[in-house]
Amino acid sequence: MNLERVVFGFFIILTLSLNAAFVAGGLETVAHHNVWILTVTIIVNLVAIGLKLGDRSQTGALLLAAGLVAGLLLVTARIVWIVADPEGGGGPGPAEMADIVSIATGALVANVIATVILVGDTLLSRR
């Protein structure tokens, strides 16, 4: 067992799980989406990107690209949340919430792709 792959797989799967937890719920319902889950997802995604920066393989490049796309979209969603709710009161309105969840769903797609690449690479690797 390679400890580096375990740690990286942990962060990739945790990012995917947190991203799915944020996206789940009604699209325009603010009460269904927690800003802290979005923030923790961004942090965990950044850690996963940092772990893959030194990998020079083709699979590593794809994983890094997928992580960068997911990170960019998650940060964009958080910026939209900050702009839509600058005082941190009741949360963004339904239209802004739909935008935030849509952007986070795009990040979820990138995280699913990263997870599929990771699982495929793991299954094809020799012992």
Image (spheres, grey):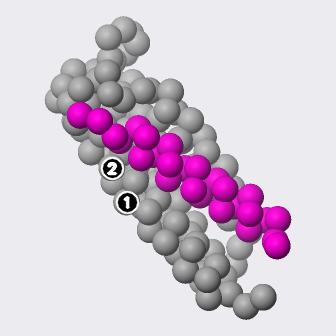
Q: What is the CA distance from the residue labelled 1 to the residue labelled 2? A: 6 Å
Is residue 66 positioned above or below 48 on the image? below
Magenta residues, dominant SS class? helix
| Tag 1: amino acid | Val
Q: Residues within 10 Å of mark 1 (few under 14, many from 20)?
A: some
Q: Is residue 20 magenta?
A: yes
Tag 1–tag 2 contact (CB < 8 Å): yes
> For the magenta stretch, what is the residue range?
1-26
- Quadrant for the N terminus in the image: bottom right
In the image, 71: left or right of 105? right
Q: Nearer the viewer, residue 45 or 121?
A: 121
Is residue 51 positioned above or below 31 on the image? below
Q: Position of residue 38 (x, y in %)?
A: 47, 35
- Quadrant for the C terminus in the image: bottom right
Residue appearing at x 55%, y 80% in the figure: 120
Q: Is residue 69 magenta?
A: no
- Residue on which the image places disc 1: 109
Residue appearing at x 50%, y 53% in the figure: 16
Residue appearing at x 42%, y 46% in the figure: 20
Residue appearing at x 37%, y 60% in the figure: 109
Kindly identify which numbered label has been placed on residue 78: none
| Tag 2: amino acid | Thr
In the image, 44: left or right of 3? left
Q: Residues within 10 Å of mark 2 (few under 14, many from 20)?
A: many
Badge 2 element: helix
Locate residue 61: give its quadrant. bottom right
Q: Position of residue 52 (x, y in %)?
A: 68, 64
Q: Nearer the viewer, residue 121 or 71?
A: 121
- Residue on which the image places disc 2: 105
Q: Is residue 101 visible?
A: yes
Badge 1 element: helix
Is residue 22 positioned above or below 12 on the image? above
